[in-house]
């Protein structure tokens, strides 16, 4: 699962992927991005033949959605269902994207208190080299029938956790190494083949990750500061 992550600023994204933006919304570095936030996303501009940077709501709204309220819990898409489940199928076939990140947070149960309630410790996971990387994502454009407003949205794919990360949570986001990113966003590749490529790439990427306990204030999406990514002793603030 991926419910919070650290997002690079616009300059870092432009340096890493040599892109410009399609919108006028500047992207600041954020340390505690939560679902429904507007985040930077990279997609293949078929007319220009290169990656382009856009803003997207984190929480996919499929193009066929008829309700005025967006679907809940659509910020993660299980890779096993991405090519077949109606919620993700069209986006996986025709609008695969990359979600730039510096790392993400995961919650692990560590104990129970006197009342029997579960206590959880937050962990930060990132590449050891600290370079920005990408989650595999899918995106969609939805038009509100009442207002005519067009909304670009996205979801991050998840897969079964591997290696040391399996001790934190049963799921992890799909991380795409540099060499797999071009194939993922190129929708000339059939969706099933793209999913197979992404799943294999994510498993191999685990070897270059590190994780450690961080400040419990990650729980509060209103807290967004660099200290959230600093290591602490488990169970401390």
Image: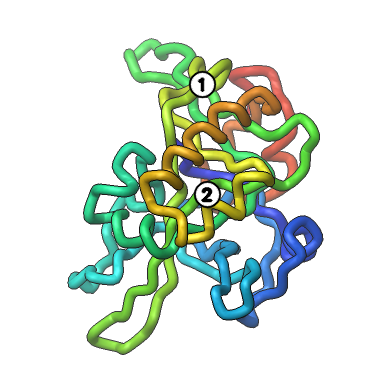
Which numbered disc flags the more N-terminal residue, 1 or 2? 1
Tell me the SS state at disc 1.
Answer: loop
Say whether residue 212 is visible: no
- Asked if marks 1 and 2 touch (Cβ < 8 Å), the reply is no
Q: Residues within 10 Å of mark 1 (few under 14, many from 20)?
A: some
Q: 25 and 154: which one is in front?
A: 154
Q: Which residue is mark 2?
A: 221
Q: Is residue 162 above or below residue 175?
A: above
Residue 100 lies left or right of residue 154; in this view the side is: right
Residue at label 1? 162
* Residue 109 location (% of width, % of height): 45, 18
Residue 197, image x, y percentages: 50, 40
Location of residue 215 by image quarter: top right
Nearer to the camera, 154 or 116: 154
Classify residue 226 by image quadrant. Answer: top right
Alpha-carbon neighbours of circle 2 within 10 Å: few (<14), some, or many (≥20)? Answer: few
Distance from disc 1 to disc 2, alpha carbons, whole Å, reads 27 Å
Comparing labels 1 and 2, the label whose residue is closer to the camera? 1
Q: Secondary structure at mark 2?
A: loop
Check the picture and name the quadrant holding the C terminus.
top right
Front residue (pair 224, 103): 103
């Amino acid at each position: 699962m991926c419910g919070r992550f650290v997002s690079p600023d616009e300059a870092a994204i432009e340096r890493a992927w040599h892109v410009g933006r399609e919108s006028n919304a500047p992207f600041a570095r954020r340390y505690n991005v939560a679902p429904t936030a507007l985040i930077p996303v990279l997609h293949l501009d078929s007319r220009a033949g290169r990656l382009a940077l856009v803003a997207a709501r984190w929480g996919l709204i499929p193009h066929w959605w008829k309700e005025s309220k967006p679907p809940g819990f659509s910020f993660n898409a299980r890779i096993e269902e991405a090519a077949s489940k109606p919620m993700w199928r069209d986006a996986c076939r025709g609008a695969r994207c990359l979600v730039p990140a510096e790392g993400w947070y995961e919650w692990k149960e560590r104990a129970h208190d006197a009342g029997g309630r579960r206590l959880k410790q937050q962990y930060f996971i990132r590449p050891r080299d600290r370079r920005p990387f990408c989650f595999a994502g899918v995106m969609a454009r939805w038009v509100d029938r009442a207002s005519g407003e067009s909304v670009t949205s996205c979801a991050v794919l998840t897969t079964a956790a591997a290696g040391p990360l399996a001790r934190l949570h049963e799921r992890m986001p799909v991380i795409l190494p540099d060499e797999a990113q071009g194939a993922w966003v190129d929708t000339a590749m059939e969706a099933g083949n793209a999913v197979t490529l992404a799943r294999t790439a994510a498993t191999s990427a685990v070897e270059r990750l590190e994780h450690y306990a961080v400040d419990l204030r990650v729980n509060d999406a209103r807290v967004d500061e660099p200290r959230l990514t600093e290591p602490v002793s488990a169970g401390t603030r």
